[in-house]
Image: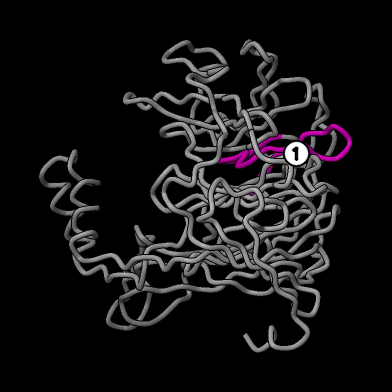
Amino acid sequence: MLALAVGSVGCADTSGSPGDALRVTVEDSAGVSIVENSAPAPDSRLPWDFGAQPLLTIGAVDSGEADQLFRVTDATRLADGRTVIANSGSNELRVFNADGSHAGTWGGRGEGPGEFVSYSPSAVATWPGDSIAAVNPWGTRLSLFDAEGNHGRDLSLDPAMLDVVDLLPDGKIFTNSGGGIRGDMTGSSGLVRSNAEWGVLAKDGTLLTSLGEFPGSEFYAIFGADGSLQGGMPHPFGRGTLGAVWGELVAIGVQDSYEIKAFASDGSLVRVVRRDGDPERPTQADLDEYYTRRYADLPDEDRISSLNAVRDMPLVESYPAFSEVLSDRAGYLWVRDYRTAVWTVFDPEGRIQGLIETPPDLRVFEIGEDYILGWVYDELGVEYVQLWSLSRALPDAACPGTCGPSTRGLRRRLRSG
């Protein structure tokens, strides 16, 4: 990088690393910290533990009560131990006490104040001042409730930035414009990928800062003889762009390579975090095996039709370099490996600390200082929200005075586009 040739300062260390295999090089270029991390060995595991069983499981097979969940999209834990669940199947926020008992239900289906339309609320999180915010994406608004569930107000969002990613600690909103397949696209059948603008909205929902355009998800698009779009579907190995709030910063990672850029809310680039290792390229056999497994339980006629629909799907250049990005309330950045439950953990400065594997099949919603909150479903499709303990053990050098509590904001579980 030419920028590093002028006025850069470098250092190498292994502070906070479980073993000598983890190496970090930090360069400074014009005020931007560039952190180069070695690829961790499989045994570079952090001495952190989740316990053998969840502390709390919320969910029921056929109770007919509030604990029978449907289309859970997110959950957050409040300071008093209550858990707020975004149950989009009923367009409600369902609240449970620390012991798992039902404390209340907020919102409901509709277009009025504090109500939610189809497939929403899509996310829920705390808002400054002990309020709770829930995203109504199709209504391009944020609904705010107080700690007792009383609806306060609805905040209209800039309609061009319809995909809420995260909330910053001060109430600013990290968002993007989607970047999916569009009806006005023309061309020939194959992979398409449109860009999305990422930005930060002010607390009043208006655009405060544009962070620029980043690639959206890769779609397989089918065009007719006249070049018009006939249909399309996400590529099963498609790459996109992921984001999360990281302390006072917003982090954006394009899945083509293992690089995450962290910006201040004014749009200035603060940090670039990289990890060694090139993603592998899928083969035709990998693609065939994926769809054979996916459609295995369909009736013969439906299975043959479904396989024919993807017969000409092309290969992507590589698998995604990572599959999820989250930050925890201690300021660490967690990046999940593609198609595994193994996460690489970086300290608040972007230095690699090691690997950790989350409980099997748990879709992680939130990581606290001493817990993780997530969602699972069983073989019958019954949904559960689970709270697990998180016990951390790291040398003091791993937390160089910057690991104070940070506010976790909204985190959309959907890939951009």
Residue 152, given in percent of the width and then of the height, sits at: 85, 34
Image-quadrant location for residue 18: top right
Quarter of the image with the N terminus is bottom right
Residue 226, given in percent of the width and then of the height, sits at: 32, 83
Q: Is residue 117 above or below residue 184?
A: above
Three-letter residue code for mark 1: Ala
Q: Is residue 342 left or right of residue 397?
A: left
Q: Is residue 289 visible?
A: yes
Number of other residues with Cα within 10 Å of mark 1, as a class: few under 14, some 14 to 19, many 20 or more? many
Question: Residue at position x 73%, y 41% from top?
Answer: 396
Q: Which residues are magenta?
A: 115-138
Q: Which residue is mark 1?
A: 133
Residue 290 or residue 163, whichever sits in front: 290
Residue 132 or residue 19, whichever sits in front: 19
Question: Residue at position x 68%, y 37% from top?
Answer: 124
Residue 387, given in percent of the width and then of the height, sits at: 58, 24
Question: Residue at position x 32%, y 26% from top?
Answer: 379
Q: Is 39 included in the stretch rendered in magenta?
A: no
